[in-house]
Image (cartoon, rainbow, N blue to C red):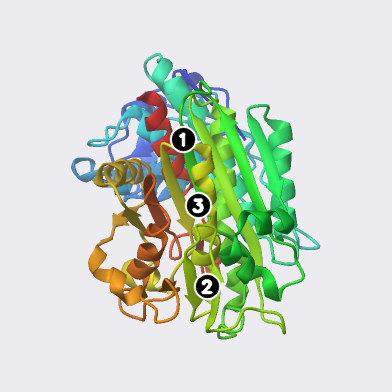
Amino acid sequence: MEFSIKQGSPDKLRSGCCVIGVFENGKLSEQGQQLDRAAGHRLSDLIARGDMTGKNATTLMVPQMEGISAERVLLIGLGKQAEISAKSYLEALKAMSRALQQTVSKDAAVCLQDIEVPECSEEWKIRHCILSISESAYRPDQLKSKPATPGTLKKITLITAGKPGVAMQRAVTQAAAIATGVDLCRELGDLPGNICTPTYLAARALALGKTHKTIKTTVLEESHMRKLGMGAFLSVTKGTEQPAKLISLEYQGAEKSQKPVVLVGKGITFDSGGVSLKPGAEMDEMKYDMSGAASVLGTIQAIAEMGLKLNVVGVIPSCENLPSGSATKPGDIVTSMSGQTIEVLNTDAEGRLILCDALTFSAKFKPDTVIDIATLTGACVIALGNVASGLYSNQDALAQDLLAAANFTHDKAWQMPLWDDYQPQLESNFADMQNIGGRAGGSITAACFLARFTKAYRWAHLDIAGTAWKSGKDKGATGRPVPLLTQYLISRAAQ
């Protein structure tokens, strides 16, 4: 989809659909009032008649009227003007996006950028408008024999009363790039495990490197991992016939001397739990256990498209976790790349086993910061539900930067404790540590496990088990936390 922003008068806009706002008292937004005057106050008449209440997130599609150039007008309820907030504005944008997808319009002019939203900048409104429309356009039915007919909407123009400045133009470019990254993340997540294998993920990473000259992609095979001593990673892939892959993508947007931010994404393309087999109910959703990897690929694509002035490396350890006669057994002891030994008490706690070697491997890039992203623990879902990702860090300043990015994007995160008080739960009688710490504080002890491999650099961990996908009727990948990660990197580049 094509996005742009320009100054314009809503009554003179030639478009398939012109979008304007209505407050709950029946008052039109300023641009709406301008459109209403040109249409001989027909919009006011509709509102006075009760066809549109202005209640937040309500919509009304109005056919073409004399005096205006647009083929149709979409009225969006904004609620009470005195009570408008970031949350209510986002709800209105979602309603608008759904309504636009149901039209036959090929293009639309959106006149909601000049609505005053407390503590929200023009750039914020632009970002969320574009992401909302892009999200509504996504279709997960590519593998159906008869996919739904794609929507006709191809072009969106954001309309402002004043001339948009450089910052607003940049916001459009960045938001459009983030939207493509979110789409990639969702597409990969929604693919089934028989298609999206470690080899497939590696191929998509290599394709990114061919598309963008700023990205160098490298794929290491299991033989190379053995030479590196990645015994923890390789212990997870022993039960499957699919070969594991260690994928790295080096994006160079700044001078080579600049230390990179390394993003490490968990890439378990299907997780049965191994010998510690998961229950059968909803096991199909374990195709989403590579959502961390998908978010890294989506983020790398987004920053490459926007040409971000920053060096970023993506590291993706990818494999399947299946049971077989050769699979790792509970009680087995493996040696990680760091030299630390691990007693595997539960083969379903496999994410930390591939991540610990990937985190050790990440040190070779001499990073400024390392952030790992993983659908790591069901315990995080119990703690935070499906609203916020769990955030852990060995530096509070880094955690605060990530939380600021989460707040700006509404890709919410919540900082959890990473205290040494939890470390004793990982003690083993037979190895340096065990891979689980018991039921109590399960998300925390998983992060504490990873912390043992990240002492050489600034590090943060995002547990996205509750936020990477939705279950039930709306089952599907969300594309999170691509918005959070890209905003963090945008802010880093600006510094």
Of residue 275 and residue 308, the one placed in the foreground of this image is: 275
Contact check, label 1 and label 2, Cβ < 8 Å = no
Mark 2 neighbour density, 10 Å: few (under 14) some (14–19) many (20 or more): few
Which label lies toward us, 1 or 2?
A: 2
Q: Is residue 111 left or right of residue 321?
A: left
Which label lies toward us, 2 or 3?
A: 3
Task: Mark 1 or mark 2: name the one nearer the start of the chain.
Answer: 1
Which label lies toward us, 3 or 1?
A: 3
Q: Between marks 1 and 2, how big is the CA–CA gap?
A: 32 Å
Pinpoint residue 437: horizontal percent, then vertical percent. Answer: 37, 77
Residue type of the residue flagged with mark 3: Thr
Which quarter shows the C terminus?
Answer: top left
- Residue 326 vs 76, above or below: the answer is below
Residue 121 bears which disc, if any?
A: none
Residue type of the residue flagged with mark 2: Gly
Task: Tell me the SS state at disc 3.
Answer: helix
Residue occupied by mark 2:
472
Which quarter shows the N terminus?
Answer: top right
Residue occupied by mark 3:
360
Q: Between marks 3 and 1, how big is the CA–CA gap?
A: 51 Å
Task: Mark 2 or mark 3: name the one nearer the start of the chain.
Answer: 3
Residue occupied by mark 1:
19
Residue type of the residue flagged with mark 1: Val
Q: Between marks 2 and 3, how big is the CA–CA gap?
A: 37 Å
Pinpoint residue 294: horizontal percent, then vertical percent. Answer: 58, 52
